[in-house]
Image (cartoon, grey):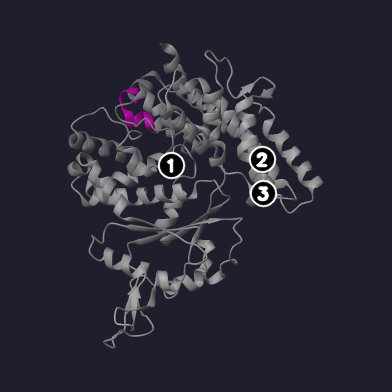
Amino acid sequence: MLEPAFLRGIGSGGQGYNARRFLEIAFLIEFALEWKQRPLASRVSALADPWAFMAAVDAVEGAETRQLRHMLVHLTHPESFERIASREHKRRVAAAFSSLLGGNAPDDVDRCLLAVRQVLEQLLGRKNFDFYWPPLVDVWNDQGDAGDAGIPLDALRHKRQIVLYGPPGTGKTYRAKSIAERLIRPALLAAMEPHDYFGRQAEVADGIQRRTHRLQLHPAYGYEDFIRGLHIDGRGGTEYRPGYLPRLVAEMGRDDPSIPHVLILDEMNRADLSRTLGEAFSLLEDRGQNIELPGAGADGRTTTLGIPENLYVIGTMNLIDQSVEQMDFALRRRFLWVRCSCDRVALVSASKARWERAGGRIAWERVASDFERLAMAAEALNREIADSPLLGSQYEIGHAYLLDAVSFLREDMGPAPRTFLWANDRAKRPVEQTWELSLRPLLEEYLAGLDARSRKSELAKLQAVFLRPPVVSD
């Protein structure tokens, strides 16, 4: 009964806390020393007042960057401070829900979150909720504990168009959809009555889906498809017909302009983007302006095109896709660029979701550490690939290629398994299968241009790195 409680605790500091644990412990010691030096009356007073206690913790040098700062104030005053150990998470929660305060949000993020909680208690009719639980978590978070989760969204809000680029299998399309959802949800919360928003989640989900537009690009896709083209009409003559973008703009004209629409241009470097975008090339920078399109209709009238302020564009791009030449520099500067690499947190999170979705007698907590070691093995493999003169960082393995380890493990487990993916000094069969069936074929394709001896030698080196049991530091 106690095992799950000790395994889970009440929260997690995430990967960032584990990587800098020595700094966190040093901060805790420094706080304890300063706290002991306070007169007894001062300590009693601070413990009775949550904001006085927060001030005492914040007075310790380095408090603004330590996650234990947030843990301490929550553990001593859980009624005033959220169960959130990340300053970035607090900032994002406050930004997403501050519209509920009607322009009266406190500057201090902890006071702001308390005010938001008090409003949500009235709206939801209960006190038992958490910002990491649905439907609240869906408003602000899409990347679990990933440290850079807010970066793409902030970039998108700033520039209105970004590109997620990286090796295949790094979840760029999934991430683009998640970013779109996080952009649209707070706008729907602000546009709807909060009670309606939380009470009609199916309607909210439909609103997000209707405002997220995904377009798969490919070498045959061009200006005539995206902007407009000349077509044969029913009388044997010709007429101009609007392409994807004008039809989308017309659809947006019938919607609330305060709510964003997101256009996902999937695998954008597979098309000739300069030709495909046409007039939209300039309009990406000149929002709110109209450009006259060439040619006139049968009535002699010309057509204009503009990109509304509330249309956001997310492109995705595989680094190794060589089907078209590189984008020109003028087009590149119209986007902000966010690299997507193999994500250790995303790998473990996705593995957990698959494991729990499949059900079974073995709880995730029993296998979690093995999947952490699998993520470490993937990181070691990618370091070797990045340093290899025959490959390079653009050929890193995306975390999606490692998810088959979940099903391989389930098929391999006996009735009472004692070990899972790793057994002391060796990788077990599920890890070997992941290499042979998921990773090796991909790497063989990447190395196809080499002579047989060089290819065999490189694959052997990479295999040894991946199958070497990672050392877990305490």
- Residue 22 has which mark? none
- For label 3, the SS is helix
Q: Main secondary structure of the magenta part?
A: helix
Q: Earlier in the sequence, mark 3 or mark 2?
A: 2
Residue 159 location, x and y as percent?
A: 43, 61
- Disc 3 packing (10 Å; few <14; some 14–19; many ≥20): few
Residue 121, quarter of the rendered image: top left
- Residue 88 has which mark? 1
Between the C-alphas of marks 3 and 2, the distance is 9 Å
Question: Looking at this view, is 104 or 328 the one in front?
Answer: 328
Residue 19 location, x and y as percent?
A: 57, 33
Quadrant for the C terminus, please. Answer: top right
Q: Which residue is mark 3?
A: 445
Contact (Cβ within 8 Å) of mark 3 with mark 1: no
- Residue 440 has which mark? 2
Looking at this view, name the residue that lies furthest to the top: 1
Q: Residue at x 52, y 36 (%)?
A: 347
